[in-house]
Image (spheres, grey):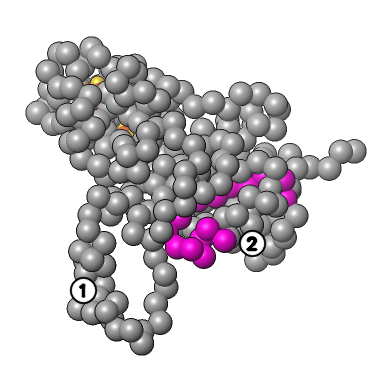
Amino acid sequence: MTSKPKVAFFDFAGCEGDQLEIINLEERLLDLVEVVEVVSFREAMSEHSDDYEIAFVEGSITTPHDVERLEEVRSNADTVIAIGSCAAFGGINSIRNEQDFQTVTERAYGEDAAMFDDPDAELFDSFEQAQPAKAFVEVEYEVPGCPIDGEEFIQTVTAILQGGDPSLANHPVCVDCKLAENTCAFDRGEICLGPITRGGGCDATCVSQGTRCWGCRGLVDNPAEDAYSEVLQEYGVTTDELLNEFTLYWSWQREHGPQADMQEVEQ
Ligand code: SF4
Ligand code: SF4
C-alpha cells in the first residue's frame, strides 16, 4: 500500500479564518483525511512534524522572522499552496502598503506608538509592507478568498493529488453574478469591483447578499483585457477607475501585477 501524502498547515500574519473554513468542512474534511496524512495543523491538533510533502500557508509575510519560517517550510515541502488572500497576494494586510508606516504604527498602537522611538525598547522587527508568500519563495498554487471557499479548497487539493490542473478560473465575478441573476450593484448606485475581480469560487455571494464585490479574490489575470466589459461600458466606468476605487485587498497586487512571481525581499 502506498503511503498517503503528508500535509502541513502554517499561519503567518492573518486571522486564521481560512484554516477555520477548512475545519468547518467537517464531513468533506474527513474525506480528505482519508487520502492525506495531516502532520501539522495548529488550529486542529497539537502534534507537529517537519516531514511533509505539501504545505499550506496562510497569512501575509510581515517580519524577517516570517521569512525565515517560510523559507524553512519551502525547503521541507515539494509543493507550497497559499490559502487565502493574505498569503496569495497580500490581502487585507496590504491595505497599509500605501500608507506612511509611521501613520500605520500610530493607528495600530495609539499612544503606545511612542515606544517605537525609544532606543531601549525591544520590539518585533516589522516590514513596512505586508507581502504574499510568493514575494519570498516559489508558490505552486493559490486558493484566494477572504476567507477561502471550502469547496474550492477541496477541488484544488483533489486536482493536485490526482495530477490534474488546479488552475484558478479567470473570469470576473460579474459572470457569476449574472448566473445568479442578481441585480447589478451599479443599478443600486454602488461601485462594484466585480468586473475586475477573479470569480469562479464565491458565486458572487456578496452581491447575492445585497452588497457589492469588494475584490477579496484578487484581480483577474490581466484586468485591462480580462475585465467584464459589458458592465464597464453600460455604467461608464474604466478598469483604472475600478483599480483605484478602493484597495481593501489588492494593494500589493496592484503594484506588482496579478501574475507576479517571486520578488526581491523588501524590508
Ligand atoms: S458589477 Fe458587481 S453587481 Fe454588477 S454584475 Fe458585476 S459583480 Fe454583479
Ligand atoms: S463577491 Fe467579491 S468580495 Fe464577495 S466573496 Fe466574491 S470576490 Fe469576495
SS at badge 2: loop
Residue 254 placement: quadrant: top left
Q: Image point 72% across, 58% down: which residue?
A: 50
Residue 62 position within the rendered picture, expressed as x and y whole percent measured from the top left: 42, 59
Q: Give the position of the C terminus as an image quadrant.
A: bottom left
Residue 45 - label: 2
Look at the image and give the residue range highlighted in magenta: 52-68
Name the kind of residue labelled 1 in the image.
Gly
Q: Image point 29% across, 77% down: which residue?
A: 116
Residue 94 position within the rendered picture, expressed as x and y whole percent measured from the top left: 33, 50
Q: Residues within 10 Å of mark 1 (few under 14, many from 20)?
A: few
Vertically, is 100 above or below 79? below
Tag 1 residue: 110
Residue 126 position within the rendered picture, expressed as x and y whole percent measured from the top left: 39, 65
* Distance (Cα) linking label 1 and label 2: 36 Å
Vertically, is 93 above or below 120? above
Residue 152 position within the rendered picture, expressed as x and y whole percent measured from the top left: 51, 33
